[in-house]
Amino acid sequence: MVLRIKDTDRIRDLAFFRTASDEIFDEAVSGAFLQRFPAGTTLLMEGDTVDFLYVLLDGAVELGAGWKSRDSTLAILKPVSTFILAAVVLDSDALMSAVTLERSELLMIPGESLRRAMKSDPAFGFAVSQELAGCYRGLVRSIKNHKLRDSTERLANYLLTQRARQGGNDTITLPHEKRVLASLLGMTPENLSRAFSKLSAQGVAVDGAKVRFDKVQALERYARPSPLIDNHFPQGESQLGKAHTERQQGVLDAL
């Protein structure tokens, strides 16, 4: 499908395209095309050769991985997000699978076009490296979240993150079904139910996809959010760098 002007504008707003010249932008997206996929479409499998950078413009995509009989959700992406950028830059195989969770529209940018633009313009190459650095720091935050917290603490901080993203309201809607949420947080559905039960003492009440917070301060005392782990924790840019560049979507959806 031919790129539409409104889609080009959305792509232009991506951090590493924002300051690119028109010439470099055109070179980077040379050969790109839009594609719509129904829910449940496998876009990519672990170990696949990566030919394109994917830009999610509409819908939702689950990134995951498996080993033996175990499967895990690594990230849930919402628009506008890129994925498989590191594999594209390195011209390497995919380390994750990607599946649409709902009807989705994606821009597929040939990896060769992106690499050629990076080589021809150092400023654009640096912008891409900043995006990769933000992704890396997000990954470190995610690893710390899983290594240093128990499952109930992870859930508590996830709920505080969603509360911040949904306007700080005392009632939120879980953005994913509980099966996906459990996998995202490194839990079984049974453990997720137990964790929600434990958090009732901190004023967390669950009704289907709705979660109500009756004692936010108690939940915060229990969760103990940290600016060294959580992007929803308030901080100034002078303290720990530009946390907003560490993508709130993608890997950080687990935080």
Image: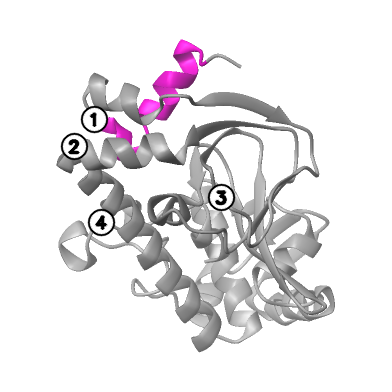
Query: Is residue 179 left or right of 153 when viewed as pictured?
Result: right
Query: Quick one: SS at disc 3?
Result: loop
Task: Say which residue label 4 marks.
Answer: 242
How many angstroms separate mark 4 from mark 3 (CA)?
A: 25 Å
Question: Disc number at residue 20?
Answer: 1
- The image quadrant of residue 97 is bottom right
- The image quadrant of residue 188 is bottom right
Q: Give the magenta range.
A: 3-18
Residue 209 percent coordinates (x, y) = 78, 53
Which is closer to the viewer, label 2 or label 1? Answer: 2
Query: Is residue 163 left or right of 5 when viewed as pictured?
Result: right
How many angstroms separate mark 4 from mark 1 (CA)?
A: 20 Å
Name which of mark 2 and mark 4 comes first in the sequence. Answer: 2
Query: Quick one: SS at disc 2?
Result: loop
Toward the viewer: 234 or 230? 230
How many angstroms separate mark 3 from mark 1 (CA)?
A: 37 Å
| Amino acid type assigned to the residue bearing label 1 in the image | Ala
Which is closer to the viewer, label 3 or label 2? Answer: 2
Name which of mark 3 and mark 2 comes first in the sequence. Answer: 2
| Contact, mark 2 vs mark 1 (Cβ under 8 Å) | yes
Query: Is residue 74 left or right of 42 when viewed as pictured?
Result: left
Name which of mark 3 and mark 1 comes first in the sequence. Answer: 1
- Name the residue: 22% across, 59% down: 236
Residue 181 percent coordinates (x, y) = 71, 63
Task: Say which residue label 2 marks.
Answer: 121
- Name the residue: 42% across, 68% down: 230
Name which of mark 4 and mark 1 comes first in the sequence. Answer: 1
- Name the residue: 16% across, 42% down: 122
In the image, residue 60 above or below residue 159: above
Query: Quick one: SS at disc 1?
Result: loop
- Name the residue: 39% across, 34% down: 113
